[in-house]
Image (spheres, rainbow, N blue to C red):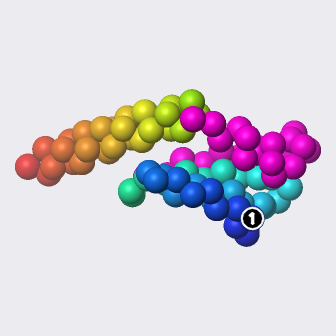
Amino acid sequence: MRVIEEIPHPRFKIQIFSYNAKYIVKIELGQFEQSYKIGELDVMGLEDVKNMISHDFLSNCLKRFVDMRSDWESSFRNKNIQQN
């Protein structure tokens, strides 16, 4: 898997990889990450993939990150309760 593009963003680390005839878009925020795979034949190249990373898409990613953090914190609390 190799990085073919890094997209600057003030909040997220956004990378696009090429692997096994797929583009993989990886978005990181802190300790959490989301990845999206799309077949190379399903788009018209890297520019198509970059155009899919819109403001609305990233806003929804942020909501998912908030949910992920909430789920993780809840799981962590439950772990501590079960040990006591």
Q: Residue at x 78, y 61 (%)?
A: 19
Callout 1 amino acid = Ile
Which quadrant is the N terminus positioned in?
bottom right
Q: What element carries label 1?
A: strand
Q: Mark 1 points at which residue?
A: 4
For the view shown, which residue lies furthest in the bottom direction?
A: 2
Residue 77: x and y in percent read 19, 44
**Front position in the image: 15 or 36:** 15
Q: Which segment did they paint magenta?
A: 32-55
Q: Residue at x 57, y 30 (%)?
A: 56
Horizontal arrangement in the rendering, residue 57 relative to residue 16 (left or right): left
Q: Quadrant of residue 64?
A: top left
**Front position in the image: 56 or 82:** 56
Above or below: residue 74 compared with residue 13: above
Q: Does the magenta stretch include residue 4?
A: no
Above or below: residue 76 compared with residue 16: above
Residue 67: x and y in percent read 37, 35
Residue 82 in sight from this viewpoint? no
Q: Is residue 45 magenta?
A: yes
Residue 65: x and y in percent read 42, 41
Q: Which residue is drawn at 70% across and 53% down?
A: 24
Categorize mark 1 by other alpha carbons within 10 Å: few (<14), some (14-19), many (20+): few
Horizontal arrangement in the rendering, residue 71 relative to residue 14 (left or right): left
For the view shown, which residue lies furthest in the left direction?
A: 84
Horizontal arrangement in the rendering, residue 51 relative to residue 34 (left or right): right
Residue 29 in sight from this viewpoint? yes
Q: Residue at x 90, y 43 (%)?
A: 44
**Front position in the image: 78 or 71:** 71
Numbered circles on residues, count: 1
